[in-house]
Image: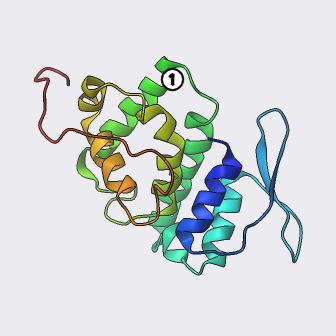
Amino acid sequence: MAAAAELTLLEKSLGLSKGNKYSAQGERQIPVLQTNSGPSLTGLTTIAAHLVKQANKDYLLGSTAEEKAVVQQWLEYRVTRVDGHSSKDDIRAVLKDLNSYLEDKVYLTGYNFTLADILLYYGLHRFIVDLTVQEKEKYLNVSRWFCHIQHCPGIRQHLSSVVFIKNRLYTNSQ
């Protein structure tokens, strides 16, 4: 999914009604937002943080200094590890890392839903939707997290719902 499409989904999920106009620059199609009152903003995470502040939902950026740092860490992870990496091996490595990380967490920051969860969900959707049942079971913590995020009000919108089986079918998938 193109970054502009993700930002439009984010706008809607945040309850922002005015549709911003996005353009893309460079070979990697980095999103650019021309603001009404100042310079243009460049980059998915920069624009997303701006939209969160515009919607007065700063809690999505983290509530403590540590949580804010973790949100930034995962936003950076999204841009550096997920975007532009589409080989099966790259995605398997991302899913393996994420599965390990999410073992004892509900959300990426622990127990609070943040912008990092939203953008990582959008970034991973195109890969998760193509996983087999066995692969979803192999990355059980990612599947649990992803299923939870897709059911958060206003997040999934027009994206296809990914089906997860509640009972394990394969006993040796770990």
Point out the image quarter for the N terminus: top right
Q: Residue at x 49, y 48 (%)?
A: 159
Q: Residue at x 29, y 56 (%)?
A: 106
Q: How is the image coloured?
A: rainbow
Residue 79, position in %: x, y? 62, 42
Q: Identify whether 162 is placed above or below 22.
A: above
Residue 129, position in %: x, y? 42, 35
Q: Which residue is mark 1?
A: 90
Is residue 35 found left or right of 8 in the rendered image?
Answer: right
Residue 132, position in %: x, y? 32, 25
Please tell me whether mark 1 sits on a helix, a strand or a loop. helix
Point out the image quarter for the C terminus: top left
Residue 12, position in %: x, y? 58, 67
Q: Residue at x 61, y 78 (%)?
A: 55
Q: Amino acid at mark 1?
A: Asp
Q: Nearer the viewer, residue 163 or 108?
A: 163
